[in-house]
Each structure stands twice: as structure tokens, then as C-alpha cells.
Amino acid sequence: LAAGLDESVHLLTPGGRVLVLAYHSLEDRIVKRRFAQLSGTGSVRTHVPKGLPAPELDAPTVRLLTRRPLRPSDDEAAQNPRAESARLRAVERIA
């Protein structure tokens, strides 16, 4: 999933968008973290010993379009119970 997200963003031209619909919390977590890393808002969890320079972060390549995942409305979930667990996240390529 992470490799697919990276490749899909790489193939976009600036202004292009990637939308991911996840039905499971583990999938959503992978998408959330990868989009955060690509947008430059994710935390870098590296342990650098004192006195050594911190690693340089890559410039952001995407802009988050959904700060929080979009979820189906109550009406939609009532009509389609399978949609209740769905989460939609989106990013736009900026560079």
C-alpha cells in the first residue's frame, strides 16, 4: 500500500490529486502516515545521538486536502451498512 501511494504521487503532475478510500483502520493508518510524510507534517521518529546533525527532511511534495478523513453520512450508512467503516483521504501534488 505504501509503495502504491508513493508511486501514485510520483506519477501525478502538479495539481493532480490522489484520493484513497480505506475500509480498515490499519489501512487508514498507513495512508495517514504516508500522506503526512509526503506533506512534511509527519514527525520524524529517528533517534540521533547528541552532537550529531539531524537528518534533512525532504521538501513537501503534496498538500493535504483532508485534515481529517471524510466519513459517510448517517443516511448513507443506513442505506449501505458496509460504508460505515469507510474513510476518505486526499492529497494534491504541489511539486
Image (cartoon, helix red, strand yellow):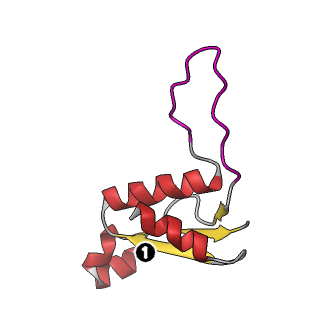
Q: Is residue 75 visible?
A: yes
Q: Image point 43% across, 75% down: which residue?
A: 73
Residue 50 drawn at (x, y percent): 60, 14
Along the line of sight, which residue is nearer the eye, 73 or 70? 70
Residue 46 falls within the magenta-colored stretch: yes
* Chief SS of the magenta region: loop
In this view, the residue farthest toward the left is: 81
Q: Amino acid at mark 1?
A: Ser
- The stretch of residues the image draws in magenta is 43-59
In this view, the residue farthest toward the bottom is: 79
Q: Residues within 10 Å of mark 1 (few under 14, many from 20)?
A: few
Q: Judge whether 4 appears above or below 13 on screen.
A: above
User: Mark 1 = which residue?
Assistant: 73
Along the line of sight, which residue is nearer the eye, 11 or 72? 11
Q: Judge whether 8 appears above or below 52 on screen.
A: below
Which part of the image, by quadrant, shows the N terminus?
bottom left
Q: Quadrant of residue 90?
A: bottom right
- Side (left or right) of 39 relative to 5: right
Q: Is residue 70 visible?
A: no
Along the line of sight, which residue is nearer the eye, 65 or 85? 65
Residue 42 drawn at (x, y percent): 57, 46
Residue 29 falls within the magenta-colored stretch: no
Along the line of sight, which residue is nearer the eye, 93 or 6? 6
